[in-house]
Amino acid sequence: MMTSHGMPPVCCRPPTRRRASCGAPMQRHARCPGDQSSMQGAPLLHMPPPAHLSAHAFSRTAAVDDRALLAKLASGRLSGDALARDAGLTRAAVWKRIQNLRAAGVDIEGRAGDGYRLATPLDLLDAACIRAGMAPDAAAGLAALDVAWTLESSNTTLLAQSAPEQGVAVLLAERQTGGRGRRGRQWTSPLGAHIYLSASRRFSGGLGQLAGLSLAVGVAVAEALRGCGFADVGLKWPNDLLARERKLGGLLIEGGGEMTGNARAVIGLGLNVHMPAAAAASIDQPWIDLDTLAGRPVSRDQVVAAVLSALLPALDLFEAQGLVPFLGRYADLDVLSGRAVQVEEAGTRHRGVALGLAADGALRVRLGDTVRLFHCGEVSVRPA
């Protein structure tokens, strides 16, 4: 049965009852292939830690990895002695791992004599669950779908690899140490908190064809999020996802190739989902996350499945027809059109009224009695 936004129900595992870290019972929300329930347009619900974590259970003969440690902490409060004993490590070694996880953005509570626990449930990504939750036609277009634990940057990693001959290679990271946005700005990337996604694809027709790709991708992502129940999501030229006047996410398109031959693009998406308080303190602009929009935690797996189900067909359409099929759809998502804006170009500020997109994706701005076009990469835009 299809959900209200045109996707099959998203994979999860059979319902179980488990004890949440706060001590209250928590019902696992399951949605598997064959589940006949429908979301009815409601924001997607959070799933507790995937069961595959338990496969990495502690062993006296093997060193504990971060996933196994998090799985233990998700089961309830445990003392340092118990963690060390089960892992075959010293208490000092376990403490160091916990400190490293805290530095990566995981909120772990710990009190002397009372042990450690996760302050909030952890929502780790599951590649099999994402793939099973995608629309079948989109899933068939995946050349690869991988989830890494820690990377410098998912874009950087895919740029260092060849693009697949056919289809799209998708790489997600639980954490990035060097996440970046447009113009090299840092993108806050705590572990297990947000969506850090990159997609690598070949395009025929050369680099010139890729002009406007970020706008088409923005349309696909924003429409997918609206289809999941996040009705406030819109697009701010050239590459931002906004909701309620605050930044929800951003896009970064990188690549290379020939002007008239084959080209490749790596499409990077950063999307705020569960913003930790410590990470929020380092952000210097108004932000929002999907949890805030939904009023409750959402599932990153389900959001990724929805985004990829929209993105892969959009890339096929863009290669075949360019930006034209996306212009009208962009207009429905445009948060700047008709508003006073300030455009910064080469150190000069221009104040005017945004008039939407030109046919090539440039931003049209009325400056007094004239209309000027501003192209991506030259300007930054702020509501005046």
Image (cartoon, grey):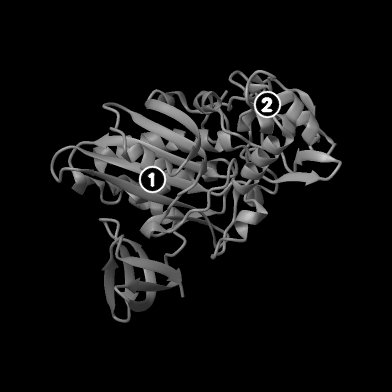
Q: Is residue 154 above or below residue 288?
A: above
Query: In screen coordinates, is 232 left or right of 294?
Result: left
Depth check, front residue: 56 or 271? 56
- Amino acid type at image mark 1: Val
Residue 217's mark? Answer: 1
Snapshot quadrant of residue 121: top right
Task: Look at 69% across and 35% down and name the residue there.
Answer: 94
Query: In the rendered image, which residue does mark 2 sit on?
Result: 30
Mark 1 surroundings: few (<14), some (14-19) or many (≥20) residues within 10 A:
many
Q: Residue at x 63, y 21 (%)?
A: 62
What crowding class fits label 2: few (fewer than 14 Cα within 10 Å), some (14-19), or many (20 or more)?
some
Q: Position of residue 10 (x, y in %)?
A: 58, 28
Image side of residue 259 versus residue 106, left or right: left
C-alpha span from label 1 to label 2: 29 Å
x, y percentage for residue 124? 60, 34
Give the quarter of the image for residue 26.
top right
Residue 345 x/y as whole percent: 31, 72
Toward the left, the furthest residue is 260
Could you tell me how many numbered marks the image carries?
A: 2
Q: Earlier in the sequence, mark 1 or mark 2?
A: 2
The kind of residue on which mark 2 rests is Ala
Q: Looking at the image, is 237 positioned above or below residue 203? A: below
Q: What element does badge 1 sit on?
A: helix
Q: Can the viewer see residue 305 in this picture?
A: yes
Determine whether 59 is above or below 205 in the image: above
